[in-house]
Amino acid sequence: ALRAKRRAALAQLDTLTQSIFLDMFGDPATNPKGWPVLALENVAVTTSGGTPNRSVTEYFGGGIPWVKSGELRQGVVTATEESLTERGLAESSAKLMPAGTVLVAMYGATVGAIAVLGMEAATNQAICCVQPSRELGVNYLLHLLRRLSPTLIAKRVGGAQPNLSQELLRRLRVPLPPLEMQRDFTCRISSVAKLEAQSNASLAELDALFASLKHRAFRGEL
């Protein structure tokens, strides 16, 4: 019951952040507040990552975090399942991206998932890395793209498994409110982010406790 309530609280916190965004900026799909609109390529730089040859074991297991598209569910990526060595980075198309880079999953089961790097890391080729210019705040861009994700997914191209593309992202039309408003948005949601972090930590503890109790129950120790 506690785990269910914690998940419900996290869902409400996510809804609160979305409400703050809509109250300040309006729906970016319709731009009711009449902000100037530019193509994303005019206010950000996009690139994709790469996967080193898996047959070369020396490419993996180093100190460089390597993000795969399935890990974008974290929201803020602060840990990865795999890592690269310096050689793996140098001898592949993977690139080291700074913290604050916004990540967009371009294909596969997680297409349209959006997160932000909480650390310096490389990514695989299924992820588009978006580095905002000084005119575009990271948090504003992150939540803007999340609001526009259904629009992006609807524009996928391809056969049996349609994909997004960097070109599609670059052409995406984005409203550009004043930078001061974007900074104010970051300040407003920072307290929500702290509550989310606390709730996630609490949920992890509850999940661990539940798993322990279940294990003991099946062994007849309760």
Image (spheres, rainbow, N blue to C red):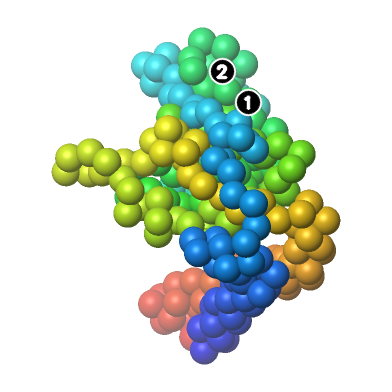
Q: Estimate the x, y position of residue 59 in percent, counting from the top left.
A: 50, 17
In depth, the one of 213 and 148 nearer the eye is 148
Q: Residue furthest left?
A: 160
- Residue at (48% x, 44% y) in the render: 172
Kind of residue at badge 2: Leu
Query: What residue is disc 1 on?
Result: 96
The residue positioned 59% from the left and 44% from the top of the image is 38
Amino acid type of the residue tagged 1 in the rendering: Leu
Where disc 2 sits, the SS reads helix
Q: Nearer the viewer, residue 70 or 44?
A: 44
Q: Earlier in the sequence, mark 1 or mark 2?
A: 2
Label 2 sits on residue: 89
* Residue 138 coordinates in the image, percent (x, y): 69, 48
Quarter residue 9 falls in? bottom right
Residue 186 position by quadrant: bottom right
Residue 96 seen from this side:
yes
* Residue in the picture at 54% in, 82% down: 8
Q: Is residue 2 left or right of residue 163?
A: right
Q: Nearer the viewer, mark 1 or mark 2?
A: 1
Residue 89 percent coordinates (x, y): 56, 18
Characterize the local packing of mark 1: few (<14), some (14-19) or many (20 or more) Cα atoms within 10 angstroms.
some
Proximity of marks 1 and 2: CB atoms separated by less than 8 Å: yes
